[in-house]
Image (cartoon, rainbow, N blue to C red):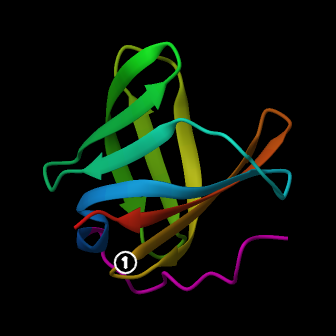
Amino acid sequence: MGLIGFVSCGQSKDALHGSWELAVSKIFEVEEESFAGVNWIFEASGRFLQISDAPEGHIERTARWEYEADSGQLHIIYDHSDNDVTWVVVELTSDTLAVEYTGYGFFVERIFVRKK
């Protein structure tokens, strides 16, 4: 069962533009007690930046992104990697981005809040 019903239908990709900060991360519906500070930045040009403050240091990953509003699929295609990830957007408002990922034996839920 997902976070909530799909409510992003009708939201254009423009709604994703900007910076988002990870507020909640769950794996198999269990909230992670500690996770690195993660920020997602969506640029209007289609470029994407993921910034993580992990114990091993500050990590930045670049990619391009594509959003299919009708299906809610958010494709992150990482540069210099075969690691492309497709998230399903289950909520997209002016302040909240909630996504889900199922693959490689995992079910992951993440909720981001817009950085002001």
Determine the secondary structure under disc 1. Answer: loop
Left or right: 23, with 47 as reference point: right
Q: Which residue is drawn at 54% across and 24% down?
A: 83
Corner quadrant of residue 4:
bottom right
In the image, residue 43 lies at what x, y percent? Answer: 18, 51
Which of the image's four quarters has the N terminus? bottom right
> Which segment is the magenta one?
1-13
Query: Looking at the image, is 30 positioned above or below residue 60?
Result: below
Q: Is the magenta stretch mostly helix, strand or loop?
A: loop
In the image, residue 13 lies at what x, y percent? Answer: 30, 68
For label 1, the crowd category at 10 Å Cα-Cα, with few meaning under 14, some 14 to 19 and many 20 or more, is few
In the image, residue 95 lies at what x, y percent? Answer: 37, 78
Query: Looking at the image, is 58 positioned above or below residue 99?
Result: above
Residue 9 belongs to magenta span? yes
Q: Residue under circle 1?
A: 95
Left or right: 31, with 89 as reference point: right
Query: Looking at the image, is 43 positioned above or below residue 62?
Result: below
Q: Which residue is drawn at 35% across and 58% down?
A: 20
Residue 111 belongs to magenta span? no
Query: Looking at the image, is 79 positioned above or below residue 111?
Result: above
Corner quadrant of residue 3:
bottom right
Viewer-proximal residue, 47 or 93?
A: 93
Q: Which residue is drawn at 42% across and 67% down?
A: 113
Viewer-proximal residue, 8 or 71?
A: 8
